[in-house]
Image: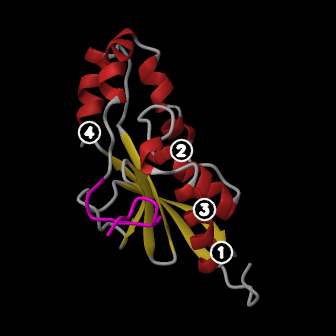
Amino acid sequence: MDPNGTAFPVQLYIYDLSRGMARQLSPIMLGKQLDGIWHTSIVVYGEEFFFGGVGISSCPPGGTMLGPPDTVVELGNTEVTEEIFMDYLSSLGETTYRGERYRLFEHNCNTFTNEVAQFLTGKKIPSYITDLPSEVLSTPFGQVLRPILDSIHIAPPGGNVINSHNNHS
């Protein structure tokens, strides 16, 4: 923890990857209303951190191809220093959150963001985000689409890979 007692703000950036299409098409395709297909990231220490098919990445806030977030949620403050946080991310990037471990429904950007939010603030991200995969898979159409969707690895362009395991340059 920071010996000076400094607190750093922690934000959750929420992006709708469907750009509003989920809200329009989900009742027809799934038989239930979904407000979005959510990608999330954590913003702390002036950087945006997220997980995708290449592993853990960072960029300036709003610096991916997704542009500015649709919603920003203030998660509170953390006293965890940037150095401790980067060590934590490096450890996650070498184990739990390597790029090849990405799974659209079970182990994705929202799983990562939820874990990091709890590490920094003790708070989880909103359940409407973490519950989305099970909502989709609970529908007949979701079950039909699962094999196709399981092969998708989302990695918003514009970030720098954090863990050296996947950074071969």
Q: Of label 4 and label 3, which has the lower sequence position?
A: 4
Q: Amino acid at mark 2?
A: Thr
Does any portion of residue 13 appear in the rendered image?
Answer: no
Q: How crowded is the residue under tag 3: few (<14 C-alpha within 10 Å), some, or many (20+)? A: some
Q: Of label 1 and label 3, which has the lower sequence position?
A: 1
Horizontal and vertical percent position of residue 59: 36, 70
Span shown in magenta: 156-169
What residue is disc 2 on?
111
Q: Amino acid at mark 1?
A: Ile
Q: Of label 2 and label 1, which has the lower sequence position?
A: 1
Alpha carbon separation for disc pair 2 and 1: 20 Å
Q: Are marks 1 and 4 in contact (CB under 8 Å)?
A: no
Alpha carbon separation for disc pair 2 and 4: 19 Å
- Image depth: mark 1 or mark 4 in front: 1
Q: Secondary structure at mark 3?
A: helix
What residue is disc 1 on?
84
- Image depth: mark 3 or mark 2 in front: 3
Horizontal and vertical percent position of residue 125: 57, 48
Q: How crowded is the residue under tag 1: few (<14 C-alpha within 10 Å), some, or many (20+)? A: few
